[in-house]
Image (cartoon, grey):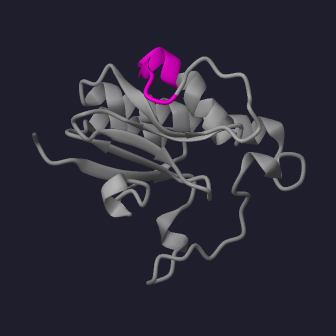
Amino acid sequence: MPPLIEKRVTKYDPARRNAAGQYLSEEWTSFGDVGTSVTLEEYQQFETGYITAALELLRGSGLSGLRVAGLENPANHAIPFDEGTWLTLDALEEAFRLVLREQIWCRFEDDSGAFVHFGWDYSMYVGVTRTTPRAIAAAERLGLFVEDFPSPYRETAR
């Protein structure tokens, strides 16, 4: 298998990080901040951006979907999939939204090692075997920053 290209995709400008990688600006970091430090409209703009960027990176790598791994659903939200379910790109859109809105948490992965992971601080990590300039440009047009960065949520990273 080809090596993975791992990216961190966020709304956080890397120029605002210190040498240790800490983000130095105060910004909203979760769906729970809607109504206090971010409007619903602004939140939805970024949420759509994250989902669009992830799907473009997956498409650009030739992937048709990912499997649910490590599913956590402590509030027992009604969701249309279980641990191990294979989700097509279309189904991933709604699953990503559930994670971003903190209704569930899980990793999305496949047997090649490709993945999409979401972090607690509104960070997204994508691992694919190839990227395209079009996919990176799409994320940047949506106001997101794409950096080379390994996912801290990979099972092998634990």
Q: Quadrant of residue 80?
A: top right
What residue lies at 84% left-to-right and 56% top-to-bottom? 37
Q: Is residue 138 visible?
A: yes
Residue 34 on image: x %, y %: 83, 46
Q: Is residue 48 visible?
A: no
- Camera-side residue: 140 or 11? 11
Q: Determine if the magenta segment contains residue 113.
A: no
Residue 59 on image: x %, y %: 32, 25
Residue 101 position (above or below residue 156): above
Q: Quadrant of residue 24?
A: bottom right
Residue 17 position (above or below residue 57): below
Q: How many marks?
A: 0
Residue 109 on image: x %, y %: 36, 36
The quarter of the picture where the N terminus appears is top left
- Camera-side residue: 7 or 41? 7
What residue lies at 43% left-to-right and 28% top-to-bottom? 84
Q: Determine if the magenta segment contains residue 91.
A: yes
- Camera-side residue: 49 or 75? 75
The quarter of the picture where the C terminus appears is bottom left
- Camera-side residue: 31 or 77? 77
Q: Residue furthest right?
A: 35
What residue lies at 24% left-to-right and 24% top-to-bottom? 62
What residue lies at 40% left-to-right and 28% top-to-bottom? 67
Residue 79 position (above or below residue 120): above
* Region rendered in magenta: 83-92
Task: Left or right? Give the position of 143 relative to 139.
Answer: right
Residue 88 position (above or below residue 52): above
Residue 131 on image: x %, y %: 25, 39
Q: Residue furthest bottom?
A: 19
